[in-house]
Image: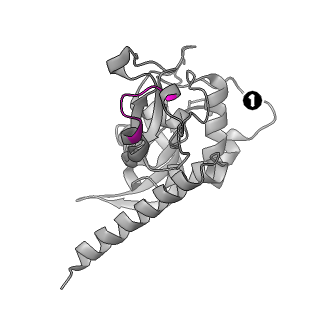
Amino acid sequence: MQSPHSSTKARKQRTSASRHASAHSSPRLTTELDVRIGVFRQPAMQTPVLVLNASYEPINICGARRALVLVLKGVARTEEEQGSVLHAARMKVAMPSVIRLLEYRRIPHQTRALSRKNILLRDRNACQYCGIVLTAGELTLDHVIPRSRGGLSTWENLVACCHECNRRKGNQLLHELTEMKLQREPRPFSLHTSRHIMRMIGSADPSWRRYLYFESEPELQFVA
């Protein structure tokens, strides 16, 4: 007799396989709804949290785990809550949706640090070859020009990729493949990208809107 755990695991595998099959049979551009679903389908402690400077300017997006650490250390305070509660051994903590730094932080004018997290954020959690939107744990990074063929780890050569496309591409160049191409040219994480992603994620969370949608926009910069 099949155990409940095995049955649940089998259902998850079938669902994942179905999503991949659909994406590869009919490639399409990623929609804003796809992005919001992909981002908010993360595990609870990785749910995105909007970070405000002490002046209430939006300056970053971090995971819920990092936001809780900042709040518990007294570095930030919770401005908006998600509605769920984290139950610890001796306390209950409301999960934040928006936090604000208690001391003003001057943000340097620079591109965000090159990292796996920022590559996935730039690419909206979507495979850049087939367009399927997945959680961070279901994605990997692909070197457009493989490292074995001289490719470097740069903004222009790294893209989010599902495991199936990663296996299909292997160490080949795109011009050597007839059925694979990039959905968009990979570029560094710019100010425009940061603003666009903040708004796309924020459109799924009403508590973010009051901090993101206003007539006179401040200069948004991200903490690397």
In front of the other: 46 or 143 = 143
Front one among 97 and 135 = 135
Type of colouring = one colour
**178 and 190: which one is in front?**
178
**x, y percentage for residue 221?**
59, 23
Residue 161, given in percent of the width and then of the height, sits at 45, 39
Work out whether residue 91 can be spotted: yes
Residue 57 visible in the picture:
no
When the figure is inspected, residue 120 is found, relative to residue 27, above or below; the finding is: above
Placement of 111 over or under 213, stated as above or below: above
Q: Is residue 169 magenta?
A: yes
Query: What type is the residue that disc 1 sits on?
Result: Glu
Give the residue displayed 43% in from the left and 66% down from the top: 15
Q: Is residue 97 magenta?
A: no
Q: Is residue 6 left or right of residue 211?
A: left
- Quarter holding the N terminus is bottom left
Rendered image quadrant of residue 63: top left
Looking at the rendering, the stretch of residues picked out in magenta corresponds to 168-174
Give the residue drawn at x 43%, y 56%. 94
Residue at the (32%, 19%) spot, across then down:
148
Q: Nearer the viewer, residue 79 or 14?
A: 14
Task: Name the residue furthest bottom.
Answer: 1
